[in-house]
Amino acid sequence: MDVAVTIMISVLMMGVGHWFRWEMLFNGNRLPRLMAYVYGVLAICVPVSGYLWMAQLERALYVLWGTVAGGGLSVMGMHLVDWMLEETRRRQEGEERESELMRALHGTND
């Protein structure tokens, strides 16, 4: 596979992903951010992998997909941490509102 062909396949995949009507698959919603990341990485790495495989650069394939997997797990982990922090913040806000309501009901102003 030629370098120019590899680039064109990636460009076409990006274009399809950009203009695809994702709303049809997600009940009127846009493609979720994490899935958009995955699509973009695949649109780049799949054609490059084809090129590397055809060029018999097996070690480079391992490096590419090891890096992709590590980066993907890292992004997923960061999203999980963000979600956990947001849930903790919401819980604390709920507890504060509940405490304020209880004070108001009992007439205390601590």
Image (cartoon, rainbow, N blue to C red):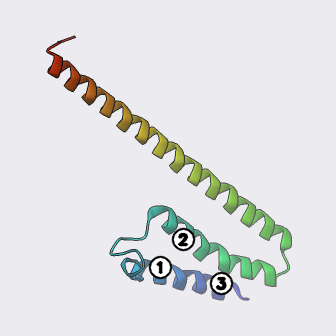
Label 3 amino acid? Thr
Label 1 amino acid? Gly
What SS does tag 1 mark? helix
When asked about the image quadrant of residue 18, the answer is: bottom left
Q: Position of residue 45 (x, y in %)?
A: 65, 73
Disc 1: which residue? 17
In the shown orientation, is residue 12 left or right of residue 66? Answer: left
Disc 3: which residue? 6
Q: Position of residue 35 (x, y in %)?
A: 51, 67
Q: Position of residue 60 (x, y in %)?
A: 80, 68
Residue at 27% x, 23% y: name it.
Answer: 99
- How crowded pointer 2 is (Cα within 10 Å; few <14, some 14-19, many 20+) is rated as some
Q: Pick whichever, 105 or 42, lies toward us.
A: 105
Residue at 62% x, 51% y: name it.
Answer: 74
In the shown orientation, is residue 67 left or right of residue 86? Answer: right
In the shown orientation, is residue 73 left or right of residue 20? Answer: right
- How crowded pointer 1 is (Cα within 10 Å; few <14, some 14-19, many 20+) is rated as some
| In this view, 54 is above or below 35 | below
Instruction: Tell me whether circle 1 and circle 2 mark residues in contact (CB < 8 Å).
Output: yes
What SS does tag 2 mark? helix
Image quadrant containing the C terminus: top left
Residue at 41% x, 78% y: name it.
Answer: 22
In the rendering, which numbered label is found on residue 40? Answer: 2
First in sequence, mark 3 or 1: give its number: 3
